[in-house]
């Protein structure tokens, strides 16, 4: 009965109130990251559907929303927002009428992110270190390109997530996009230096406890809250990328790191995925030719292994066996000659 009453309230409430009630009911079942995303989606949906109640929303209204959002957002983002709306309409039993007329926007076949060229990577390393105002953006770039971490995973790192003895970092649930992205990553030299720079910086800003964030939230110019993560470093990154002549997003650094792992012939897909946490099927498929070449080299090596001589046969089994010293190519040439001679004989007849 309480659930039924709650569902009836969702149908009768204004859109904003219905969203707030639905979100509260979903909170125990979703991750903190998903909850934050849902709050953002609800805010955008409310700007369009505020005058309506949930039962008044139909396929036409959703199509109008898609057209309105396409001017400022990509298909993936709009589909996620509509998916949340779909969940609420399912809760009140209205979605079955809309479903036959709803179409999600087609997603682009290629990822919007790309790997850097060696020249671009070198240029970013050089230019990023030239301006102290870009220190956080530059360190985040170095960590991401050497660990596969996304910006959200770096932003939510706490001091307790850094193991200084083992030189590892742990991506925790708060920053992970999903459960597959919770992982421990060993740090190579560039990533370790960037982490240690941020570690020293955090101490200067008052972050001394294990639960304090490695990149704390800035309240004012010289005041920081160690218990809140930084909102980001978009402006500094934008300046750094502009100076380097690049038009890419921060997520491209993760894409670049995964690309290099998958291209490396000595790194298996399982190892790459344990580092990255999750790799899309399309990315693994794109680099499957590299894996085929590794397998080909392994099988070619079998041909170079000389067979060991058999044990000496017993007298009862010993018998003269003609030794064939002709090579495989000589045998094939002889066979080819015989076939040609037989063909010529048949033509004469």
Image: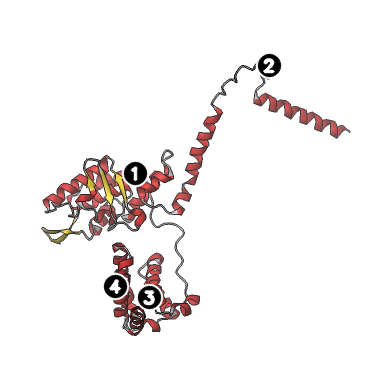
Residue 234 at x, y = what percent? 25, 59
Callout in the foreground (3, 4): 4
Dot in front, 2 or 4:
2
Q: Which residue is mark 4?
A: 24
Callout 3: helix, strand or loop? Answer: helix
- Left or right? Give the position of 80 relative to 217: right
Q: Disc 1, disc 2: CB below 8 Å?
A: no
Residue 5 in the image, given as x and y percentages of width and height: 34, 82
Q: Looking at the rendered structure, which numbered label has been put on residue 318? A: 2
Name the residue furthest top: 315
Residue at image point 49% right, 77% down: 101
Q: Which mark is residue 170?
A: none
Q: Earlier in the sequence, mark 2 or mark 3?
A: 3
Q: Are marks 1 and 3 in contact (CB under 8 Å)?
A: no
Task: Depth check: give the residue in front, 217 or 337.
Answer: 217
Which mark is in front, 1 or 3?
3
The residue nearer to you, when weighing 1 against 103, is 1
Within 10 Å of the Cα at label 2, are there few (<14), some (14-19), or many (20+) other Cα atoms?
few
Q: Give the residue displayed 22% in from the left and 61% down from the top.
A: 231
- The residue identified by callout 1 is 119
Residue at 36%, 49% in the rendered image: 276
Which residue does the numbered mark 3 point to in the structure image? Answer: 88
Q: Quadrant of the C terminus?
A: top right
Q: Earlier in the sequence, mark 2 or mark 4?
A: 4
């Amino acid at each position: 009965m309480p659930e039924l009453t709650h569902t009836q309230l969702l149908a009768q409430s204004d859109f904003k109130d219905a969203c707030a009630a639905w979100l509260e009911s979903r909170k125990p079942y979703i991750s903190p990251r998903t909850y934050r995303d849902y709050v953002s989606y609800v805010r955008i949906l409310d700007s369009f559907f505020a005058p309506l109640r949930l039962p008044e929303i139909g396929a036409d209204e959703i199509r109008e929303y898609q057209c309105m959002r396409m001017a400022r957002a990509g298909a993936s983002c709009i589909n996620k927002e509509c998916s949340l709306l779909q969940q609420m309409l399912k809760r009140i039993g209205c979605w079955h009428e809309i479903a036959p007329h709803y179409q999600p926007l087609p997603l682009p076949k290629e990822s919007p992110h790309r790997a850097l060229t060696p020249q671009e990577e070198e240029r970013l390393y050089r230019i990023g270190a030239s301006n102290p105002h870009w220190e956080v953006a530059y360190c985040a770039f170095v960590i991401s390109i050497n660990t596969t971490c996304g910006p959200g995973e770096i932003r939510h790192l706490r001091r307790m997530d850094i193991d200084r003895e083992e030189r590892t970092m742990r991506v925790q649930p708060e920053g992970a996009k999903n459960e597959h992205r919770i992982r421990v990553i060993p740090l190579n030299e560039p990533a370790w230096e960037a982490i240690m720079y941020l570690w020293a910086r955090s101490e200067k800003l008052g972050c001394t406890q294990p639960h304090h964030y490695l990149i704390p939230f800035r309240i004012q110019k010289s005041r920081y809250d160690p218990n809140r993560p930084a909102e980001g470093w978009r402006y500094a990154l934008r300046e750094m990328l502009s100076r380097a002549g690049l038009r890419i997003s921060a997520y491209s650094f993760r894409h670049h790191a995964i690309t290099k792992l998958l291209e490396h012939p000595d790194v298996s897909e399982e190892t790459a995925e344990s580092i990255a946490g999750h790799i899309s099927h399309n990315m693994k498929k794109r680099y499957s030719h590299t894996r085929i070449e590794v397998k080909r080299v392994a099988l070619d090596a079998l041909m170079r292994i000389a067979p060991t001589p058999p044990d000496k046969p017993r007298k009862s089994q010993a018998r003269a066996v003609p030794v064939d010293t002709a090579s495989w190519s000589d045998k094939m040439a002889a066979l080819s000659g015989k076939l040609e001679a037989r063909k010529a004989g048949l033509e004469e007849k």
